[in-house]
Image (cartoon, helix red, strand yellow):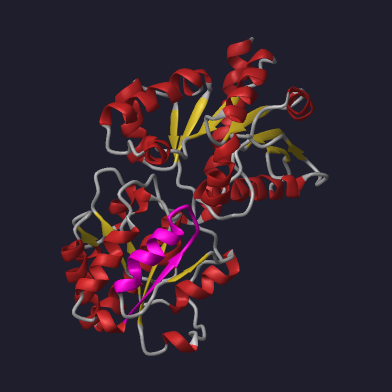
Protein backbone atom coordinates (compact mmCIF):
# COMPACT_ATOMS: atom_id res chain seq x y z
CA UNK A 1 0.00 0.00 0.00
CA UNK A 2 1.03 3.61 -0.57
CA UNK A 3 0.54 5.30 2.79
CA UNK A 4 1.08 9.02 3.31
CA UNK A 5 1.72 10.32 6.82
CA UNK A 6 1.28 14.06 7.31
CA UNK A 7 3.27 15.40 10.27
CA UNK A 8 2.75 19.01 11.33
CA UNK A 9 5.50 18.40 13.87
CA UNK A 10 8.50 16.22 13.05
CA UNK A 11 12.18 16.53 13.78
CA UNK A 12 14.30 15.39 16.66
CA UNK A 13 12.55 12.68 18.67
CA UNK A 14 12.08 14.95 21.68
CA UNK A 15 8.29 14.83 22.03
CA UNK A 16 5.61 12.15 22.14
CA UNK A 17 4.02 13.02 18.80
CA UNK A 18 7.29 12.80 16.86
CA UNK A 19 8.22 9.54 18.59
CA UNK A 20 4.79 8.07 17.78
CA UNK A 21 5.08 9.20 14.15
CA UNK A 22 8.57 7.77 13.63
CA UNK A 23 7.62 4.48 15.28
CA UNK A 24 4.66 4.12 12.90
CA UNK A 25 6.72 5.13 9.86
CA UNK A 26 9.47 2.64 10.62
CA UNK A 27 7.00 -0.17 11.31
CA UNK A 28 4.96 0.34 8.15
CA UNK A 29 8.12 0.44 6.04
CA UNK A 30 9.31 -2.77 7.67
CA UNK A 31 5.98 -4.33 6.73
CA UNK A 32 6.67 -3.57 3.08
CA UNK A 33 4.42 -0.54 2.57
CA UNK A 34 5.54 2.50 0.60
CA UNK A 35 5.43 5.22 3.24
CA UNK A 36 5.61 8.86 2.19
CA UNK A 37 6.09 11.45 4.90
CA UNK A 38 5.11 15.11 4.60
CA UNK A 39 6.84 17.20 7.26
CA UNK A 40 8.68 20.48 8.01
CA UNK A 41 11.97 18.79 8.96
CA UNK A 42 14.65 20.39 6.78
CA UNK A 43 17.13 17.68 7.80
CA UNK A 44 14.97 15.24 5.82
CA UNK A 45 15.13 17.20 2.57
CA UNK A 46 16.43 14.95 -0.21
CA UNK A 47 15.80 11.78 1.81
CA UNK A 48 13.79 9.13 -0.06
CA UNK A 49 10.00 9.34 0.50
CA UNK A 50 10.21 12.46 2.65
CA UNK A 51 8.40 15.52 1.29
CA UNK A 52 9.47 18.69 3.07
CA UNK A 53 7.18 21.71 3.43
CA UNK A 54 8.04 25.16 4.85
CA UNK A 55 8.01 25.90 8.56
CA UNK A 56 5.48 28.28 10.05
CA UNK A 57 6.87 31.81 10.38
CA UNK A 58 5.32 33.52 13.38
CA UNK A 59 7.63 36.53 13.38
CA UNK A 60 8.56 37.60 16.92
CA UNK A 61 7.29 34.26 18.29
CA UNK A 62 9.80 32.21 16.26
CA UNK A 63 12.26 32.24 19.17
CA UNK A 64 9.58 30.86 21.49
CA UNK A 65 8.70 28.08 19.02
CA UNK A 66 12.39 27.10 18.84
CA UNK A 67 12.55 27.12 22.64
CA UNK A 68 9.61 24.72 22.80
CA UNK A 69 11.73 22.39 20.66
CA UNK A 70 9.43 21.82 17.69
CA UNK A 71 8.98 23.13 14.15
CA UNK A 72 5.44 23.64 12.89
CA UNK A 73 4.57 22.98 9.25
CA UNK A 74 2.59 24.98 6.75
CA UNK A 75 1.16 23.48 3.57
CA UNK A 76 2.62 23.62 0.07
CA UNK A 77 0.22 22.58 -2.68
CA UNK A 78 2.93 21.26 -5.00
CA UNK A 79 4.47 19.11 -2.25
CA UNK A 80 1.04 17.80 -1.23
CA UNK A 81 0.27 16.81 -4.82
CA UNK A 82 3.57 14.99 -5.25
CA UNK A 83 3.07 13.02 -2.04
CA UNK A 84 -0.66 12.26 -2.10
CA UNK A 85 -1.97 12.10 -5.67
CA UNK A 86 -1.81 8.29 -6.11
CA UNK A 87 -1.85 7.24 -2.44
CA UNK A 88 -4.11 4.55 -1.00
CA UNK A 89 -4.59 6.36 2.30
CA UNK A 90 -3.47 9.46 4.22
CA UNK A 91 -2.82 9.41 7.96
CA UNK A 92 -2.74 12.77 9.76
CA UNK A 93 -0.80 12.98 13.01
CA UNK A 94 -2.26 16.28 14.31
CA UNK A 95 -5.13 18.60 13.23
CA UNK A 96 -3.04 21.66 12.41
CA UNK A 97 -2.19 23.54 9.18
CA UNK A 98 -0.51 20.69 7.29
CA UNK A 99 -2.93 18.05 8.57
CA UNK A 100 -5.90 20.13 7.47
CA UNK A 101 -4.40 20.77 4.02
CA UNK A 102 -3.58 17.07 3.55
CA UNK A 103 -7.13 16.18 4.56
CA UNK A 104 -8.64 18.63 2.05
CA UNK A 105 -6.45 17.38 -0.79
CA UNK A 106 -7.20 13.73 0.00
CA UNK A 107 -10.95 14.34 0.14
CA UNK A 108 -10.84 16.11 -3.22
CA UNK A 109 -9.12 13.02 -4.66
CA UNK A 110 -11.47 10.59 -2.84
CA UNK A 111 -8.59 9.11 -0.83
CA UNK A 112 -9.46 7.76 2.65
CA UNK A 113 -8.05 9.58 5.66
CA UNK A 114 -7.25 8.45 9.18
CA UNK A 115 -6.11 10.81 11.92
CA UNK A 116 -4.30 10.47 15.22
CA UNK A 117 -5.41 12.24 18.39
CA UNK A 118 -2.13 13.23 20.00
CA UNK A 119 -2.98 16.72 21.24
CA UNK A 120 -5.07 17.55 24.28
CA UNK A 121 -6.73 20.94 24.32
CA UNK A 122 -4.54 21.90 27.28
CA UNK A 123 -1.39 21.29 25.21
CA UNK A 124 -2.52 24.30 23.17
CA UNK A 125 -4.21 26.47 25.79
CA UNK A 126 -1.32 26.18 28.25
CA UNK A 127 0.77 28.36 25.92
CA UNK A 128 -1.95 31.02 26.22
CA UNK A 129 -2.13 30.64 30.02
CA UNK A 130 -5.71 29.39 29.63
CA UNK A 131 -5.10 25.74 30.51
CA UNK A 132 -7.57 25.84 33.40
CA UNK A 133 -10.42 27.41 31.43
CA UNK A 134 -12.88 24.58 30.82
CA UNK A 135 -14.82 26.74 28.37
CA UNK A 136 -11.75 27.46 26.23
CA UNK A 137 -10.64 23.82 26.34
CA UNK A 138 -14.10 22.64 25.26
CA UNK A 139 -14.17 25.18 22.43
CA UNK A 140 -10.72 23.95 21.35
CA UNK A 141 -12.00 20.37 21.06
CA UNK A 142 -15.02 21.56 19.09
CA UNK A 143 -12.74 23.51 16.72
CA UNK A 144 -10.56 20.43 16.19
CA UNK A 145 -13.65 18.44 15.28
CA UNK A 146 -15.16 21.06 13.00
CA UNK A 147 -11.92 21.68 11.11
CA UNK A 148 -10.59 18.12 10.81
CA UNK A 149 -11.94 15.17 12.75
CA UNK A 150 -15.54 15.23 11.49
CA UNK A 151 -14.24 14.64 7.95
CA UNK A 152 -11.86 11.72 8.53
CA UNK A 153 -12.77 8.04 8.08
CA UNK A 154 -11.26 6.86 11.38
CA UNK A 155 -9.59 8.35 14.46
CA UNK A 156 -6.72 6.79 16.39
CA UNK A 157 -6.97 7.48 20.14
CA UNK A 158 -3.91 6.43 22.20
CA UNK A 159 -6.16 5.91 25.25
CA UNK A 160 -9.84 5.40 26.07
CA UNK A 161 -9.42 8.38 28.39
CA UNK A 162 -8.88 10.88 25.56
CA UNK A 163 -11.57 9.28 23.42
CA UNK A 164 -14.10 9.75 26.22
CA UNK A 165 -13.10 13.39 26.72
CA UNK A 166 -13.34 14.22 23.02
CA UNK A 167 -16.57 12.34 22.38
CA UNK A 168 -18.18 14.01 25.39
CA UNK A 169 -17.76 17.30 23.50
CA UNK A 170 -18.43 16.25 19.90
CA UNK A 171 -20.41 13.01 20.01
CA UNK A 172 -19.67 9.48 18.78
CA UNK A 173 -16.78 8.99 16.36
CA UNK A 174 -15.36 6.08 14.39
CA UNK A 175 -12.50 5.56 16.80
CA UNK A 176 -9.83 2.96 17.47
CA UNK A 177 -8.15 2.93 20.90
CA UNK A 178 -4.54 1.82 20.38
CA UNK A 179 -1.55 2.61 22.59
CA UNK A 180 1.41 4.23 20.89
CA UNK A 181 3.40 1.37 22.37
CA UNK A 182 6.85 0.94 23.85
CA UNK A 183 9.88 -0.03 21.80
CA UNK A 184 11.39 -3.38 22.78
CA UNK A 185 14.74 -1.67 23.44
CA UNK A 186 13.26 -0.35 26.70
CA UNK A 187 13.94 -3.22 29.07
CA UNK A 188 15.48 -3.82 32.45
CA UNK A 189 19.25 -4.11 32.24
CA UNK A 190 22.36 -3.63 34.32
CA UNK A 191 24.18 -0.39 33.64
CA UNK A 192 27.00 1.61 35.16
CA UNK A 193 25.67 4.56 37.13
CA UNK A 194 27.33 7.96 36.72
CA UNK A 195 29.80 8.51 39.55
CA UNK A 196 27.88 11.55 40.81
CA UNK A 197 24.74 9.45 41.32
CA UNK A 198 26.28 6.51 43.16
CA UNK A 199 25.35 7.66 46.68
CA UNK A 200 22.03 9.26 45.63
CA UNK A 201 18.40 8.15 45.34
CA UNK A 202 17.75 9.08 41.71
CA UNK A 203 14.24 10.21 40.73
CA UNK A 204 13.52 10.51 37.01
CA UNK A 205 10.84 12.50 35.23
CA UNK A 206 10.73 12.70 31.44
CA UNK A 207 8.66 15.50 29.98
CA UNK A 208 8.75 18.77 28.09
CA UNK A 209 9.53 21.75 30.30
CA UNK A 210 6.00 23.19 30.14
CA UNK A 211 3.42 24.35 32.69
CA UNK A 212 1.11 21.35 32.28
CA UNK A 213 3.94 18.94 33.18
CA UNK A 214 4.10 20.31 36.77
CA UNK A 215 7.85 20.00 37.36
CA UNK A 216 7.60 22.49 40.25
CA UNK A 217 5.34 20.11 42.18
CA UNK A 218 8.12 17.51 42.11
CA UNK A 219 10.75 20.08 43.10
CA UNK A 220 8.61 21.15 46.07
CA UNK A 221 8.00 17.52 47.05
CA UNK A 222 11.72 16.76 47.13
CA UNK A 223 12.26 19.84 49.28
CA UNK A 224 9.68 18.47 51.76
CA UNK A 225 11.10 14.95 51.75
CA UNK A 226 12.77 13.62 54.88
CA UNK A 227 15.48 12.33 52.54
CA UNK A 228 15.96 15.58 50.59
CA UNK A 229 19.75 15.56 50.85
CA UNK A 230 19.91 12.05 49.32
CA UNK A 231 17.71 12.75 46.31
CA UNK A 232 19.00 13.52 42.82
CA UNK A 233 16.34 14.70 40.38
CA UNK A 234 16.75 14.06 36.66
CA UNK A 235 14.49 16.06 34.36
CA UNK A 236 14.94 14.48 30.94
CA UNK A 237 13.64 16.84 28.27
CA UNK A 238 13.74 20.41 27.04
CA UNK A 239 11.32 23.28 26.65
CA UNK A 240 10.51 26.94 27.31
CA UNK A 241 10.60 26.72 31.13
CA UNK A 242 14.18 25.47 31.37
CA UNK A 243 15.65 28.57 33.00
CA UNK A 244 12.62 29.14 35.25
CA UNK A 245 12.73 25.57 36.56
CA UNK A 246 16.50 25.69 37.09
CA UNK A 247 16.11 28.86 39.16
CA UNK A 248 13.17 27.39 41.11
CA UNK A 249 15.23 24.32 42.01
CA UNK A 250 18.06 26.36 43.59
CA UNK A 251 16.51 25.60 47.00
CA UNK A 252 17.42 21.91 46.66
CA UNK A 253 20.65 20.45 48.06
CA UNK A 254 21.33 18.61 44.78
CA UNK A 255 20.55 20.56 41.63
CA UNK A 256 18.47 18.65 39.04
CA UNK A 257 20.09 17.25 35.94
CA UNK A 258 18.22 19.03 33.13
CA UNK A 259 19.16 17.57 29.78
CA UNK A 260 17.72 16.16 26.58
CA UNK A 261 18.86 12.56 26.09
CA UNK A 262 18.86 10.54 22.88
CA UNK A 263 16.77 7.37 22.78
CA UNK A 264 19.88 5.25 23.40
CA UNK A 265 21.01 7.49 26.27
CA UNK A 266 17.51 7.42 27.73
CA UNK A 267 17.69 3.66 28.19
CA UNK A 268 20.85 4.11 30.26
CA UNK A 269 19.30 6.91 32.33
CA UNK A 270 16.15 4.92 33.13
CA UNK A 271 18.15 1.89 34.22
CA UNK A 272 20.29 4.13 36.45
CA UNK A 273 17.29 5.61 38.28
CA UNK A 274 15.59 4.43 41.49
CA UNK A 275 12.08 5.83 41.02
CA UNK A 276 10.00 7.41 38.26
CA UNK A 277 7.69 10.30 39.17
CA UNK A 278 5.13 11.67 36.71
CA UNK A 279 3.62 14.86 38.18
CA UNK A 280 2.00 16.08 34.93
CA UNK A 281 -1.53 17.42 35.30
CA UNK A 282 -2.33 16.98 31.59
CA UNK A 283 -1.39 13.82 29.66
CA UNK A 284 -2.97 11.75 26.87
CA UNK A 285 -0.84 8.66 27.53
CA UNK A 286 2.78 9.37 28.53
CA UNK A 287 4.95 6.95 26.62
CA UNK A 288 7.82 8.22 28.77
CA UNK A 289 6.16 6.67 31.82
CA UNK A 290 5.56 3.41 29.96
CA UNK A 291 9.21 3.33 28.87
CA UNK A 292 10.32 3.76 32.48
CA UNK A 293 8.08 1.05 33.92
CA UNK A 294 9.02 -1.26 31.03
CA UNK A 295 12.54 -1.10 32.47
CA UNK A 296 11.23 -2.02 35.92
CA UNK A 297 11.12 1.47 37.44
CA UNK A 298 8.34 1.85 39.99
CA UNK A 299 6.25 4.97 39.25
CA UNK A 300 4.51 7.57 41.39
CA UNK A 301 1.89 9.29 39.24
CA UNK A 302 -0.35 12.35 39.69
CA UNK A 303 -4.01 11.37 40.02
CA UNK A 304 -5.10 14.33 37.88
CA UNK A 305 -8.49 13.84 36.19
CA UNK A 306 -6.90 15.35 33.07
CA UNK A 307 -4.22 12.68 32.83
CA UNK A 308 -4.52 9.16 31.42
CA UNK A 309 -1.23 8.21 33.06
CA UNK A 310 -2.95 7.69 36.42
CA UNK A 311 -4.41 4.45 35.09
CA UNK A 312 -0.91 2.93 35.09
CA UNK A 313 -0.93 2.88 38.91
CA UNK A 314 -1.11 -0.62 40.39
CA UNK A 315 -1.44 0.53 44.00
CA UNK A 316 -2.28 3.62 46.08
CA UNK A 317 1.44 4.12 46.68
CA UNK A 318 1.88 4.58 42.92
CA UNK A 319 -0.46 7.61 43.01
CA UNK A 320 -0.33 11.01 44.68
CA UNK A 321 -2.85 13.83 44.87
CA UNK A 322 -2.02 16.07 41.91
CA UNK A 323 -0.55 19.50 42.71
CA UNK A 324 0.04 18.31 46.28
CA UNK A 325 3.80 18.29 47.04
CA UNK A 326 3.30 17.06 50.61
CA UNK A 327 1.45 13.94 49.46
CA UNK A 328 4.06 13.31 46.76
CA UNK A 329 6.85 13.71 49.34
CA UNK A 330 5.21 11.06 51.53
CA UNK A 331 5.03 8.61 48.59
CA UNK A 332 8.66 9.26 47.66
CA UNK A 333 9.72 8.66 51.26
CA UNK A 334 7.66 5.47 51.38
CA UNK A 335 9.53 3.93 48.44
CA UNK A 336 12.91 5.04 49.79
CA UNK A 337 12.37 3.18 53.07
CA UNK A 338 10.71 0.11 51.50
CA UNK A 339 13.31 -1.21 49.04
CA UNK A 340 12.06 -4.81 49.23
CA UNK A 341 8.54 -3.78 48.30
CA UNK A 342 9.94 -1.57 45.55
CA UNK A 343 11.77 -4.59 44.10
CA UNK A 344 8.53 -6.59 44.23
CA UNK A 345 6.61 -3.87 42.39
CA UNK A 346 9.37 -3.57 39.84
CA UNK A 347 8.66 -7.16 38.81
CA UNK A 348 4.91 -6.50 38.77
CA UNK A 349 5.38 -3.59 36.40
CA UNK A 350 7.57 -5.65 34.08
CA UNK A 351 4.62 -8.01 33.65
CA UNK A 352 2.06 -5.21 33.39
CA UNK A 353 3.78 -3.50 30.46
CA UNK A 354 3.67 -6.56 28.18
CA UNK A 355 0.33 -5.28 26.83
CA UNK A 356 2.03 -2.12 25.54
CA UNK A 357 4.64 -3.83 23.38
CA UNK A 358 5.14 -1.71 20.30
CA UNK A 359 5.02 -4.54 17.78
CA UNK A 360 1.47 -5.44 18.86
CA UNK A 361 0.32 -1.80 18.94
CA UNK A 362 1.73 -1.07 15.48
CA UNK A 363 0.04 -4.18 14.10
CA UNK A 364 -3.24 -2.72 15.37
CA UNK A 365 -2.43 0.61 13.69
CA UNK A 366 -1.79 -1.16 10.39
CA UNK A 367 -5.06 -3.05 10.79
CA UNK A 368 -6.93 0.23 11.36
CA UNK A 369 -5.43 1.78 8.24
CA UNK A 370 -6.16 -1.24 6.03
CA UNK A 371 -9.72 -1.56 7.36
CA UNK A 372 -10.27 2.11 6.56
CA UNK A 373 -9.11 1.61 2.97
CA UNK A 374 -11.43 -1.39 2.53
CA UNK A 375 -14.45 0.37 4.03
CA UNK A 376 -13.85 3.51 1.99
CA UNK A 377 -13.71 1.52 -1.25
CA UNK A 378 -17.02 -0.20 -0.41
CA UNK A 379 -18.72 3.10 0.33
CA UNK A 380 -17.35 4.70 -2.83
CA UNK A 381 -18.90 2.11 -5.15
Quarter of the figure with the C terminus: top right
| Residue 173 place in picture, x, y as percent | 41, 24
Would you place residue 121 above or below residue 331 in this image?
above
| Residue 212 place in picture, x, y as percent | 35, 48
Compare residues 270 and 330 and report the one nearer the observer. Answer: 330
- Specify whether residue 41 is in view: yes
Residue reaching furthest to the top:
381
Q: Is residue 20 magenta?
A: no
Q: Is residue 249 magenta?
A: yes
Q: Give the quadrant of residue 209.
A: bottom left
x 53%, y 68%: residue: 266
Compared across the picture, whether 77 is left or right of 95 comes to: right
x 42%, y 85%: residue: 197
x 58%, y 13%: residue: 379
x 54%, y 30%: residue: 96
| Residue 264 place in picture, x, y as percent | 59, 69
| Residue 206 place in picture, x, y as percent | 43, 61
Q: Give the quadrant of residue 199.
A: bottom left
Would you place residue 170 above or below residue 9 in this image?
above
Compared across the picture, whether 324 is left or right of 23 comes to: left
Would you place residue 187 above or below residue 84 in this image?
below
Range of magenta residues: 231-251
- Specify whether residue 276 is in view: no
Question: Count the marks: how many?
Answer: 0
Compare residues 220 and 316 and report the one nearer the observer. Answer: 220
Q: Give the quadrant of residue 245.
A: bottom left
Quarter of the figure with the N terminus: top right
Compare residues 41 and 82 and report the one nearer the observer. Answer: 41
Would you place residue 97 above or below residue 344 in this image?
above
Amino acid sequence: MKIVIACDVLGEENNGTTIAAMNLIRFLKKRGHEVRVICPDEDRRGEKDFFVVPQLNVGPLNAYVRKVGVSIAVSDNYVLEQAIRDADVVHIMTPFFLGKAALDYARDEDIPVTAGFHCQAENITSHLHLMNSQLINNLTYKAMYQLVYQYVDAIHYPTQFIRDIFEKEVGKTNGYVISNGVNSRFRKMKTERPEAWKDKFVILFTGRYGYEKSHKVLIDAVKESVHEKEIQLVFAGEGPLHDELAAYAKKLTNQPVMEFFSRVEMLQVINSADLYVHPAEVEIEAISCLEAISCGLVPVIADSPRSATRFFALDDNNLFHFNNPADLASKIDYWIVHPEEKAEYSEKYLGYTQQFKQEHCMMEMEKMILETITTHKKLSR
